[in-house]
Image: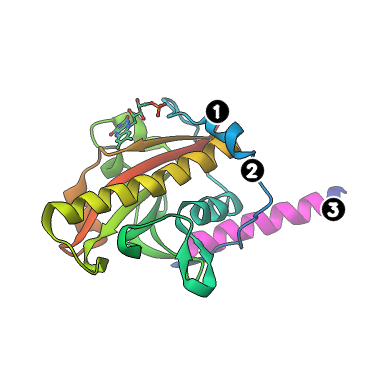
Amino acid sequence: MKHLILTLAIMFSLNLLFAQQNSTIVLNKPDLERGLPLMKALSLRASAHEFGTKEVSISDLSDLLWAANGINRPDENKRTSASALNAQDIDIYVVIKEGIYFYDPAKNILQQAAKGDHRREIASSQENFAAVPLFLLLVSDLSRFSRGDGAKLLEMANIDAGIVAQNIMLFCASEGLLARPRAWMEKDKLREILQLKDKQHPILNIAISYKE
Ligand SMILES: Cc1cc2nc3c(=O)[nH]c(=O)nc-3n(C[C@H](O)[C@H](O)[C@H](O)COP(=O)(O)O)c2cc1C
């Protein structure tokens, strides 16, 4: 038993080391059996005020991202979150101490988008958030809408981000994770760090941690 625990501990640390040294992180397949019944998760949904500092595991992160906006109908290339005109305009960036990673739902991987700790730019003047171990940053790419312009496009993008955010909040409620959706962040700095195009808009970030 001791031997098994030691082997698992070594495998886990190697996995983390691999993740930190590589620009691509392979995610796990979603575990469709986990979680509370929906009504129970809804009864627990809340925005947290204080967060823990322990890093979120790859298996929890994998399921969280799939719940947020993963591909649930591969035959039709459709997602767990609805989007206006099926634009699938919301990209998720994983912001952790080691850097910022782009979630690619088709390949089920994270691709490094920026090096270094950028949680301060996400926290902005809410400085106590800079120590939160994980943020999911929701960025809408307006160029993916087949029609519409100006305020109407931004309205659809905001609603699409809200739907992804609620999936995240419900997964967190179901799994006992702490979470808070936030519009507050240094959008211009994040645009620069991520080298976003004009039509890519950071809309929301969700702060996430384990309960400690
Ligand atoms: C669109 C949106 C933007 C928000 N922005 C922030 C924010 O920038 N900072 C923050 O601390 N909370 C933010 N919140 C969290 C709300 O303050 C919180 O949801 C509200 O107080 C209701 O609490 P509850 O989520 O626990 O029901 C935001 C929530 C939403 C839906």
- Disc 1 from disc 2: Cα separation: 13 Å
Q: Residues within 10 Å of mark 1 (few under 14, many from 20)?
A: few
Tell which quarter ligand 1 is in: top left
Is residue 203 shown in magenta?
no
Left or right of 60: which side holds 111?
left
Give the image quarter of residue 121. Answer: top left
Q: List x then y, in percent, for residue 5.
A: 79, 49
Foreground disc of the pair 1, 2:
1
Callouts 3 and 1 close, C-beta under 8 Å? no
Q: Earlier in the sequence, mark 1 or mark 2?
A: 2
Q: Look at the image and give the residue range highlighted in magenta.
A: 3-22
Disc 2 residue type (three-letter) = Gly
Residue 54 visible in the snapshot: no
Q: Is residue 85 left or right of residue 67?
A: left
- On the image, the x and y values in percent for residue 186 come to 21, 44
In this view, the residue in front, 80 or 209, is 80
Three-letter code, disc 3: His
Q: Which mark is residue 3?
A: 3
Q: Of the numbered discs in the image, which one, if any, rests on residue 43?
A: 1
Who's the residue at 26% across and 67% down the image?
144
